């Protein structure tokens, strides 16, 4: 296969908490003129899997690429039935429902799914004073959390944490959470759509749920909560690259890593990689080059870079995100230690970094 940067279909979801910031603030073109909660930039979730839009592979589902060329697409030694990363822009014009995603063990035990959903939110815009609910307050047990959820008195049992642009939350599966209103994030996560939420209304249209269904949802949520998960936001850690080029590691764990690269001048950003990269543009239009291919990338658009490409070059100025499936020692720990960052700061980026050798 003569690989090239892949432009994928990107469905927009009109969820009840959504607004118009993905188009109006980020500049994403081609969106319908109604309130949008999420755009799924790269997805291999059952029923919402992307397909290639351009080049020789146009019309090919992402699932088919994963099945036929797992190592060339994702990385040497990788095997699996689904592309492992899901990425989204989320416009929380209103508050998201208080909800939980199962971790891997709970997803297999309770949902019949192969994995759960650990995720991370990189905050792009947030109103002054914006907050998130993220984790259960210390000392709160299942019975107290249950009462708070039934009373819809979430602050009685959940931590409320300030949300600031530029910060990133690494949110393990099993963490009860919500954010919004007036918050715009980029989300990277395991490929999964498992979730249980505590609201009396449906996320799709705001309609009231029957009491029996609502109580069942709350019980299912309680079965999946991790009471020790209390994430705090981090600003990310810089790795020197070149004059005018900043590489910031925003978060990292066994399921994904997310980096933000900023190029101030016209000198190109050059990045070598061994696993697939999800490249999303936060700035103005850029040109993405890899091998003989050159792809224009507009604001808030995304490309999937197959592992077989090995290198990408982007002409500056640029402001982009790179999500990938990391080797934690090689891709995260070693460069951060070489840049002078200490073990405590590195460990705060996510999970599994101590096991990688800190």
Image: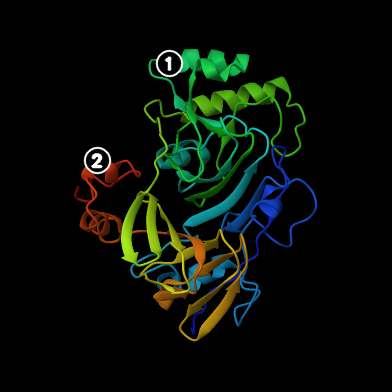
Is 50 located above or below residue 173 in the figure?
Answer: below
Mark 2 sits on what residue? 344
Q: Percent position (x, y) of residue 60?
A: 61, 73
Looking at the picture, tell me which residue is in the foreground, 64 or 85.
85
Q: Residue at x 42, y 38 (%)?
A: 233
- Is 353 left or right of 212, judged from the image as shown? left
Is 39 located above or below residue 17 in the figure?
Answer: below
Q: Residue at x 26, y 59 (%)?
A: 335
Element under disc 2: helix
Residue, far right: 33
Q: Residue at x 58, y 52 (%)?
A: 88
Marks 1 and 2: which is nearer the front?
2
Mark 1 sits on what residue? 140
Circle 1 crowding by C-alpha within 10 Å: few under 14, some 14–19, many from 20? some
Q: Residue at x 53, y 28 (%)?
A: 221
Element under disc 1: loop
Q: Percent position (x, y) of residue 9?
A: 65, 65
Is 289 located above or below residue 167 in the figure?
Answer: below
Measure how far apart labels 1 and 2 are at the Cα level. 27 Å
Circle 2 crowding by C-alpha within 10 Å: few under 14, some 14–19, many from 20? few
Answer with mark 1 or mark 2, whichever residue precedes in sequence: 1
Q: Percent position (x, y) of residue 290?
A: 47, 79
Q: Which mark is residue 271?
A: none
Looking at the picture, tell me which residue is in the foreground, 295 or 204.
295
Is 104 located above or below residue 6 in the figure?
Answer: above
Q: Are the two marked residues, 1 and 2, in contact with CB atoms closer than 8 angstroms?
A: no
Q: Percent position (x, y) of residue 49?
A: 61, 59
């Amino acid at each position: 296969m003569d690989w090239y940067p892949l432009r994928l279909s990107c469905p927009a979801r009109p969820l009840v908490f959504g607004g118009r910031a993905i188009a109006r603030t980020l500049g994403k073109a081609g969106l319908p003129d109604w309130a949008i909660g999420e755009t799924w930039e790269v997805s291999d979730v059952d029923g919402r899997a992307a397909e290639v839009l351009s080049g020789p592979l146009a019309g090919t589902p992402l699932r088919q690429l994963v099945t036929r060329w797992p190592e060339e697409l994702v990385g040497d030694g990788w095997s699996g039935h689904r592309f492992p990363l899901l990425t989204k822009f989320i416009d929380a014009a209103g508050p998201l429902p208080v909800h939980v995603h199962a971790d891997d063990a709970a997803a297999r035990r309770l949902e019949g799914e192969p994995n759960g959903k650990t995720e991370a939110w990189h905050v792009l815009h947030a109103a002054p004073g914006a907050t998130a609910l993220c984790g259960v307050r210390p000392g709160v047990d299942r019975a107290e959390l249950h009462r708070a959820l039934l009373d819809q008195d979430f602050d009685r049992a959940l931590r409320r944490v300030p949300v600031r642009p530029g910060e990133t939350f690494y949110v393990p599966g099993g963490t009860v959470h919500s954010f919004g209103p007036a918050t715009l994030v980029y989300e990277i996560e395991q490929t999964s759509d498992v979730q249980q939420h505590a609201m009396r209304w449906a996320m799709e249209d705001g309609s009231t749920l029957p009491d029996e269904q609502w109580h069942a949802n709350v019980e299912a949520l309680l079965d999946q909560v991790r009471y020790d998960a209390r994430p705090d936001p981090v600003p990310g850690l810089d790795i020197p690259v070149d004059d005018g080029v900043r590489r910031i590691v925003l978060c990292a764990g066994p399921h994904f890593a997310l980096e933000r690269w900023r190029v101030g001048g016209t000198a190109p950003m050059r990045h070598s990689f061994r696993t697939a990269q999800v490249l999303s543009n936060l700035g103005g239009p850029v040109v993405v080059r890899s091998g003989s291919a050159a792809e224009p990338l507009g604001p808030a658009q995304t490309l999937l870079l197959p592992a077989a490409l090995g290198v990408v070059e982007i002409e500056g100025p640029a402001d982009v995100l790179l999500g990938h499936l990391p080797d934690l020692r090689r891709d995260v720990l070693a460069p951060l230690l070489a840049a002078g960052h200490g073990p405590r700061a590195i460990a705060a980026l996510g999970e599994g970094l101590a096991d990688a050798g800190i």
